[in-house]
Amino acid sequence: MKDFTKDASGFVLLSEYVPDIIQEIRYYSTYNFIGDRIDGYEEPCAFLTREAARALKAVSKELIVSGYRLKVFDAYRPANAVKHFVLWGLEDQDIRMKQIFYPDLNKTELFEKGYIATQSSHSRGSAVDLTLLDMSTGQEVDMGSPFDFFGPISHPDYTGITEEQFTNRMFLQKVMVRNGFRPLDCEWWHFMLADEPYPDTYFTFPVAYDILK
């Protein structure tokens, strides 16, 4: 049985817990596959369960030694944000961001093929979407496709990209897995803490800086 709660006591603000991580919270902006700010994202910040944040801190420390920083696009996602995705997919005829994020798919296929979930692991608080930033150039590492591009090219094991792009994906994946995260088979950027603390709980509190006060 799934539980829904507004209790944020088991969460930490990522910018305070792991200040080395760069953040670009896409669902607070309008640059995402819908084209609007997503419900529940009241401020451009990221939260994770304390356990997931602790594991991500270990990832960050390891990567900094190698000359990289993590860049997070999304972490905890309120359940009503997922509802926003679902309603957009089923009822909204707006496809203005199609050519950027899902040029080869219909909206219904985004759900059928697993790119968008009707109940997301992000809402359990231990999943994160991220990439690598090269500290020597200040640029994102080339992963072969951008964040939230829905199609086979974004599958971690897709081999139709360059050897360097594939190596970059595998480097990120190996570091994340080594520190307790599990990858997703259709998104190179998505990782979830394997031993998540709230496997049956979906959280509903908004993404806002003062939510833990």
Image (cartoon, rainbow, N blue to C red):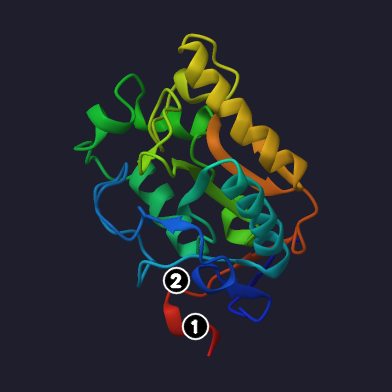
Distance from the alpha carbon under mark 2 to that under mark 1: 7 Å
Quadrant assignment for the N terminus = bottom right
Q: Is disc 2 in contact with disc 1, using a CB cutoff of under 8 Å?
A: yes
Residue 185 seen from this side? no
Q: Is residue 105 above or below residue 138?
A: above
Query: What is the residue that sits farthest to the top in this orientation?
Result: 160
Which residue is denoted by mark 1 in the rendering?
211
Q: Is residue 42 left or right of residue 69?
A: left
Disc 1 on helix, strand or loop? helix
Residue 114, which numbered label? Answer: none
The residue located at (28%, 59%) in the rendering is 37
Residue 202 seen from this side? yes
Please tell me how crowded label 1 is: few (under 14), some (14-19), or many (20+) other residues with Cα within 10 Å: some
Give residue 157's position: percent from left, percent from top.
60, 19
For the residue pair 103 and 187, the one nearer the viewer reads as: 187
The residue located at (41%, 37%) in the rendering is 147
Query: Quadrant of the rendered structure where residue 106 is?
Result: top left
Query: What is the residue that sits farthest to the right in this orientation?
Result: 195
Give residue 25's position: percent from left, percent from top.
38, 57
Disc 2 on helix, strand or loop? loop
Query: What is the residue that sits farthest to the left in this orientation?
Result: 96
Give residue 65's position: percent from left, percent from top.
61, 47
Which residue is denoted by mark 2 in the rendering?
207
The type of residue carrying mark 2 is Val
Q: Is residue 92 left or right of residue 145?
A: left
The residue located at (73%, 39%) in the rendering is 177
Total number of numbered discs in the rendering? 2
For the residue pair 8 and 170, the one nearer the viewer reads as: 170
The type of residue carrying mark 1 is Ile
Query: Quadrant of the rendered structure where residue 91 is?
Result: top left
